[in-house]
Amino acid sequence: MNEMMTVGIVGGGLAGCECALRLARAGVPVTLFEQKPDHMSPAHTSPCLAELVCSNSLRNNEPTSGIGMLKAEMRSLGSDFMRLADANAVPAGKALAVDREAFARDMTACVDACPGIVRVARRIRGLDDPALSPFDKVVIAAGPLASEELADSLSRAVGGRHLYFYDAIAPIVSAESLDMSVVFRASRYDCEQEHPGEGDYLNCPMSREEYLAFYDALMAAEKVTAREFEKEVHFEGCMPIEALAARGVKTLTFGPLKPVGFIDPRTGRRPWALVQLRQETSNASAYNLVGCQTKLTYGAQAEVFRKIPGMERAEFVRFGSMHRNTYVNAPQVLAPDLSLLDNGRVHLAGQITGVEGYVESAACGLWLGMLLAARARGRELPLPPEECALGALLAHLRRPVKKFQPSNAHFGLMPDLPERARKSDRKVKFAERAATAFAAWRQAIAGTGD
């Protein structure tokens, strides 16, 4: 191993922690710079590392989904993120959701206990910050909420070709404040199962009149506006509920408030609309309003969401909020090893690269940690094939497009199947091919010390 290689990582989020742990366990000295607790971003409240902000859901856990496949691959690679997520899981049906506070505490303890990682509470103000000068490699894993100073420095480094979008956070309510004579427990299509009423979600059914009253209040409510010099660009996969509602009065009933697969126990009929609540903590004391991320003012949120049946007296553990997410135009500014084209010493990891989602961010950090660890041994780690989930996600960052946007992991990022398949079989075939391609790659890299 090249004993001289040292790595400075900026940002103690999911990508930064995953990258740091992989490097340190490979014997590469790491200094992890995290601005908390002295400085907090607009969306963060906890002093812990790896704080999950937007949701506690890590999405589908089924291997026949792109994100489920990515999780399986990360587990195979020994991901600390996945190990701790599984250890702190809370009921969420076929999805993987975690107790956010417990997860962040465990990740913080894991990083602090790892030999080879030095954690420094310092705000890095730019790529030329003197604190970064001693390191052979610098990893910017500051996340989508990088400080304006760091974002400006990065923008100058890539020639101003950086982009941004706005992300919105859903409110969380106290379980004790819900009216359980209205709210019922079920997962979608529970009515067709042997044991209905034992699902992982709480559900607030709405009649047509109740939905229209909620919709009218939502459209009329006061919203937080962007600053004058910022143009709002929402990521399609995490749009504010009011932005979706503005597309038409029925849009929500075909989106986050769709009632398909539910029967209201009070009426024996399918509701007109339905709001799902997902367990937020391991003791089930708080619930997240699924799909209700918002940029309404706090006062407006209390007024509007209390119009949802069963939530008339809801106590808000956390209101939703709005924040800017920053990412680079990866195909134009990043090399395949996630280094800046104009500065090979500086690498990016996580959501700032243009991957979207908690799991994807951690996967990006894991991959970069593996890559740099291999190079410290004088070896080169080949890219994973595009037919597997990790390879497809990384390929998204290299693929030139007219308008680059962040992307979650999904089968659409992979090359199409060589043979025609029925729609019902396509996901299974994608998953089978991905598993085969990933296994072959794992065998091929066995000598790199991964």
Image (cartoon, rainbow, N blue to C red):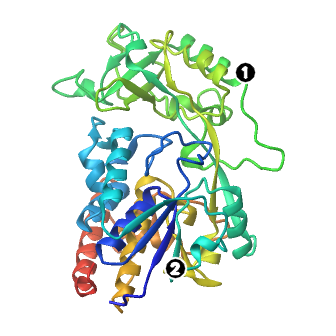
Q: Which residue is more in the foreground, 109 or 51? A: 109
Mark nearest the camera among 2 and 1 is 2
On-image quarter of the C terminus: bottom left
Residue lying furthest bottom in this view? 378
The residue drawn where x is 65% and y is 34% is: 295
On-image quarter of the N terminus: bottom left
User: Mark 1 belongs to which amino acid?
Assistant: Ala
Residue bearing the label numbered 2: 135
Q: Vertically, is 123 above or below 204?
A: below
Residue lying furthest right in this view? 228
* Residue 117 percent location from the top left of the image: 38, 67
Q: Vertically, is 256 above or below 373?
A: above
The secondary structure type at the circle numbered 2 is loop
* Residue 219 percent location from the top left of the image: 69, 24
* Residue 115 percent location from the top left of the image: 30, 67
> Is residue 263 in view from this perspective?
yes
> Is residue 64 in view from this perspective?
no
Q: Earlier in the sequence, mark 2 or mark 1?
A: 2
Residue bearing the label numbered 1: 220
* Residue 376 percent location from the top left of the image: 37, 86
User: Mark 2 belongs to which amino acid?
Assistant: Phe
Q: Which residue is more in the foreground, 255 or 363? A: 363
